[in-house]
Amino acid sequence: MVKRSAKTDKISIGVIGGSGLYEMDGLTQVKTVKVATPFGIPSDDYIIGTLNNKRVAFLPRHGRGHRLLPTDINYRANIYGMKKLGVERIISVSAVGSMKEEIKPGDIVIPDQFYDHTKHRRSTFFGNGVVAHVGMADPVCAGLCKILIEAGVQVGATIHRSGTYLCMEGPQFSTRAESLTYRKWNVDVIGMTNATEAKLAREAEICYSTIALATDYDCWHHSEEAVTVEAVLAVMKHNIETSKSMIREAVRMVTGFRDCGCGEALRNTIMTPEKLIPAKTSKYLAPIIGKYMKAKK
């Protein structure tokens, strides 16, 4: 593949692949793109290609070959890179544990809520002289969720149309005591990555939604073995194929027009007066805050 500057490709749909999803089938006119960001190096090169007549950017969250721990992923660089490429919608794919009997391994959940239980991550672009408080009451894009639900139905997946995703730090799986406690919190699935992405996508004014692939019952289930990598991989293989079919269908369904509020999520949220924002900060955050700066109008 030929590596070219990110400036040569403006695209609107991004796909972030989780455990087991390191590449996208069906892409044509494929090339890889390195994207420089002020937050460091993204998880890998972005794979740019055409899918159902739309240009798509694909990024393996853990790097090709699964090289990055959940906490070590450079989430800010990943989302900033998507923003720099022109992405307006991100479809995230993530392996999760089921916290409810009715969500069986092999099922797919489209979460509409997150509980962020991580402890060691930077989950904001802000700081360094600029403060913003973005709303996260509804942390995913309802319109994109609807598309993913419809795509799942079209490909024959068992879809749960809503749910709460608890994002734990990892990389270890839960203790039994933790798992039973999370059950009492009435969460639906547990994973290690997506709440962080959702927060950054909202700050970047990118629509975000998750295809959560249930691979196991964590370790709470009385009649199932505690989660192991071997058990996860066995279910994951089937789930990944289903998610690829869903992505192809979802990309086909996406239109250029966004009728949600994601594209203006930062409006009236920047607390720091423009004249007090350091020039360096204003420059590197220009793709995110530039349209709200008077000097840019």
Image (cartoon, helix red, strand yellow):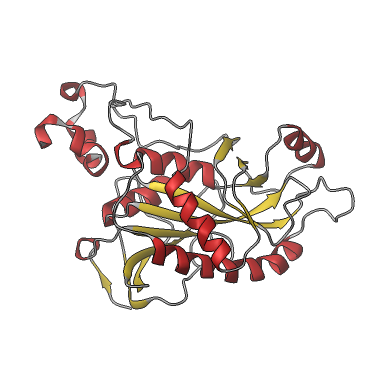
Picture coordinates of residue 106 (x, y %)?
69, 62
Residue shown at 86% from the left, 55% from the top: 224
Quadrant of image for the C terminus? top left
* In this picture, residue 286 sits left or right of residue 159: left
Q: Is residue 74 visible?
A: no
> In the image, is residue 16 above or below residue 265?
below
In percent of width and height, residue 54 lies at: 32, 68
Figure check: 279 above or below 252: above
**Looking at the picture, does residue 137 appear above or below residue 28?**
above
- Which residue sits at x=65%, y=70%? 237
Q: Is residue 16 above or below residue 280?
A: below
Q: Nearer the viewer, residue 249 or 266?
A: 249
Left/right of residue 113 with respect to residue 260 in the rendered view:
right
Between 42 and 112, the one lying in front of the other is 112
Residue depicted at x 27% and y 41%: 288
Give the image location of residue 216, x and y in percent.
Answer: 74, 56
x and y percentages locating residue 197 in the rendered image: 46, 45
Q: Number of callouts in the render? A: 0
* Quarter of the picture holding the N terminus: bottom left
Q: For the view shown, which residue lies furthest in the right direction?
A: 223
Q: Mark yes or no: residue 215 visible.
A: yes
